[in-house]
Image (cartoon, rainbow, N blue to C red):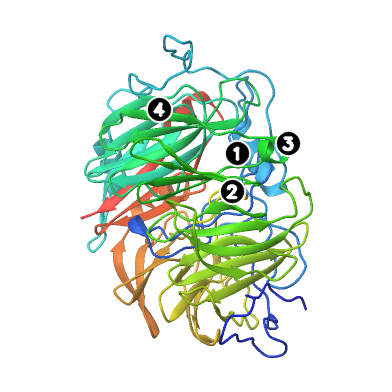
Amino acid sequence: MSQPPPQQGGPGEQGGFGAPFEPQPGVYGAPVPPQPQPGPYGQSPQPQPRPGPYGQPSRPPYGYPQPPTVPYGHPGSPPSSPPDEPRGGGRSRGRGAALVAAVLAGVLVIGAGVWFAVGGDDADDDGKSVAKESAAPKKPGPGVTPAAGADELNKGRKDGEAKVRWVEKNGVDLPQGGARVRGPWFTGDIVAKAMYRTASGHSAEDGTRKWSLRLPADVCAAPTLPSPDGKVVIGLRADTSDGAPCDRIQMIDLATGKAGWTATVERTGMQDGLSHIVMAINGDVVTVGRTTLTDAYRISDGEHLWGTLPGTCQPYGLTSGDIALAAVDCRKRPSDDDVGDEEVRRIDPATGRTVWTYKVKKGWKVDRFYSVDPPVVSLRQGELNEKWAIALLNPDGTYRAQPVPGKENFEVQCGEPGENLDDCIGAAADSDTLYLATKPAAGADGELTNSVVAFDLGTGKATWKVPAPPAQTLHPMRVENGQVLLYLTPPPTKEALNGGGIMALGPQGGALRPVLRHPASAAKAVIGLFDPTVRFVGGRSLISSGYITAETDEEEMDLRTMIAFGD
């Protein structure tokens, strides 16, 4: 049995049975989405794996067949993830099936040729591409509005079920293989997202498009959360050519859709040039991390705050939110190919100054952050990340405990490998308890179902387990007012008896309490959203597709991409 990475020398270190930091008998499924400290919009602090090569695939809908999982503390196959936005041209009528096949097979899919252009680039007087406002993307069709889409799904809605408030359809002609969606981000009464070469803002109340911003190249990275004053900084490719590097960043005011400052991030060496970008926002600071280093910029004016830090240890990714936790790589020199010793640090995002350090056991590396307050860290070992462990830390970064899995398999669903460290669902924590989703397995009726298990943060021992209803799965989102909020998927049956929704469990477990029931009449539409992101804000929920693709242009344009629920 392998040992997970322990913290070095912290007081009160504990292990389970056997040697300190030794994983207990049992199996955890490969983490898919980690959850960081409870954050706004139902989003936990989100950690992402170490930067890796482009082209990783993304996850399918919650509760449905996932890429292979990795046992906790045992060898196995690493999880695969969905394809990044393919660079390549030509329209393909079978691209939807090809994408699914690629995800299931864990293959890398990269197109060849030229982009199917949505439009030409704009340029300033110096010939440099600039982002400009433009007409809204193509409409899905005459008479199709967010309200009309909601009316269609509300037919047959039962008492006690929330309404579908609005439905957004794609309406954007995409290149072969489709495109990833970044966001959604909330600010005031706006919910915004970015995809391909457009960012857009919609009314959180009724879904109407408030603004649309044309971008000069493809979106290739973005933070999980916006700034407190409603700004976001996204990553763009250098230009529209095939294989253009992801080295440009663009600030956008989400309230107005106005483009602000831009900057170019220097990327040197093959390892840096091919790595994903990990972006995070902490207050007025945005950080851009990759394999070899991190750069920080002030969001309000674009000033570069810091880059390479003193010493051989450099952060390669941070979490968004009030607390900035960093995954740090310590190498003898930046060009070293071997995995160096790794650390978790809490840092001051404005200066890069270290507040505290947790040293990961040699040979292990930081995978994701399931929570930032308290710190809960997913750790991996092996060339294929085949071994998995979870470290529970105290607020000062000292080791606290590790979960004792018993005979359960666990699965946390996260974004693409190598990107943000805080974009997971399936894990949540407060000062006393960690909540983890088990890996879905066939129930008595043959349909997939799972459970939520609570662990005492002081001992790592499981305290209770609550199963999901038959044919449905539960996914912890965040802890609020002493209760863990969970997303319950709708059952994948032709005539769903319920539509799932937002549920709650108290600190002692017990019966699931409905917080917002989604209508059964919308179940099929929800299941049709690929790689979904779930947000719960102000008593309302929003489910958004994380990847858009279809068999034909017409189907692609008409795809539902966001569904909002609430009374």
**1 or 3: mark nearer the eye:** 3
Q: Which mark is residue 416?
A: 2
* 539 versus 290 height, above or below: below
Circle 2: element type: loop
**Which amino acid type is shown beneath numbered disc 3?**
Met
* 103 versus 143 height, above or below: below
Circle 3: element type: helix
**4 or 3: mark nearer the eye:** 3
Tell me the residue at 35%/24% (across/down).
139
Q: Residue 399: where, in percent of width, then height?
A: 57, 79
Determine the CA span between mark 4 and mark 3: 37 Å
Q: Which mark is residue 270?
A: 3
Task: Report crowding for label 4: few under 14, some 14 to 19, many 20 or more residues within 10 A (C-alpha).
Answer: many
Tell me the residue at 54%/26% (across/down).
552
Of pointers 1 and 4, the one earlier in the residue sequence: 1
Question: Which part of the image, by quadrant, shows the N terminus?
Answer: bottom right
Q: Which residue is mark 1?
A: 84
Circle 1: element type: loop
Determine the CA span between mark 2 and mark 3: 20 Å
Q: Which mark is residue 308?
A: none
Quadrant of residue 102 within the rendered picture: top right
- Along the line of sight, the residue nearer the viewer: 91 or 16: 16
Q: Is residue 549 left or right of residue 26?
A: left
